Image (cartoon, grey):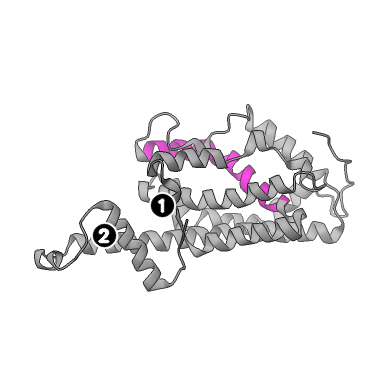
Amino acid sequence: MESTKSKPRDSTGSDLSEQIKAATKDSHVRAENTQLMLNYQKGQITQTQYKLLLCSLYEIYRALEEELDRNADHPAVQPVYFPQELARLESLELDLEHFFGPHWRKRVTVPAATHRYTQRLREIGKNSPNLLVAHAYTRYLGDLSGGQVLGKITQKSLGLSGIKGIAFFSFPGVTSPNKFKQLYRGRMNSIELTEQQRQEVLDEATRAFEFNIEVFDDLQKMLSITEEASSEKRNDTASQSQSRTFSNSPILQFALGVGITLATVGMGVYAF
């Protein structure tokens, strides 16, 4: 892959990667302190939580990587286009098949916030490919930075063995995450942007974090309502249970929770 010409630093003396880090500092802290992520970091992740998170990650990465592929030759995208090293879609498909079986595509469920996130990725991929740089940087370098730790937490919390179910956290094409992140930042800093374009990328990076925060919050709402519905169902009396037309299987309890989510908070759950 050919490198682009280096762009002189702007008047602030900061490279684009440094500027993004500064611009998103507050949003980054907020994302790490959402209830879902706090639970995750404490090792309090359940299989239901993880499966729902995988569903959202799958749709987000499907949109991001399809738009990166489509714009691979764009001057802003080409320097940071590393499909062999970074692509997550195939790994997510393996994880989803592990948990849902061969027909997993019919069982993927995501909240409205995920749908809004993917719509934005499709929109900028079509109209403003420069901005894909912000989303790629935010997602991929975040995954590289925390992937190994979160992978071990997930494996321990869910009692998984080997890589089954946690392929998303593995980057076999990256031998040294730290060295690769340095390479990636260097490539990104070489992208030639006008001052207006640079500011738009910074704004989009902040927006990317906000999208992630909304996804985490929506997933937590789904989980809370699902758990509440399951708890109420377990406490039903025998007469109440007899009046129902569905079974007590865990799968249908989960479906009940998603249905109540739709009716109660109107989150607009999408399935495909």
Q: Secondary structure at mark 2?
A: helix
Q: Secondary structure at mark 1?
A: helix
Image depth: mark 1 or mark 2 in front: 1
Q: Which residues are magenta?
A: 133-157
Q: Is residue 41 visible?
A: yes
Q: Which residue is mark 1?
A: 107
State the predominant SS element of the stretch in magenta: helix
Most foreground residue, 235 or 202? 235
Mark with earlier residue (1, 2): 1
Give the residue type at disc 1: Arg
Q: Position of residue 67 (x, y in %)?
A: 68, 50
Name the quadrant of the N terminus: top right
Which image quadrant for residue 190? top right
Local crowd size for mark 2, using a 10 Å CA cut-off: few (<14), some (14–19), many (≥20): some
Q: Which residue is mark 2?
A: 230
Most foreground residue, 197 or 259? 259
Q: Position of residue 229 (x, y in %)?
A: 28, 63
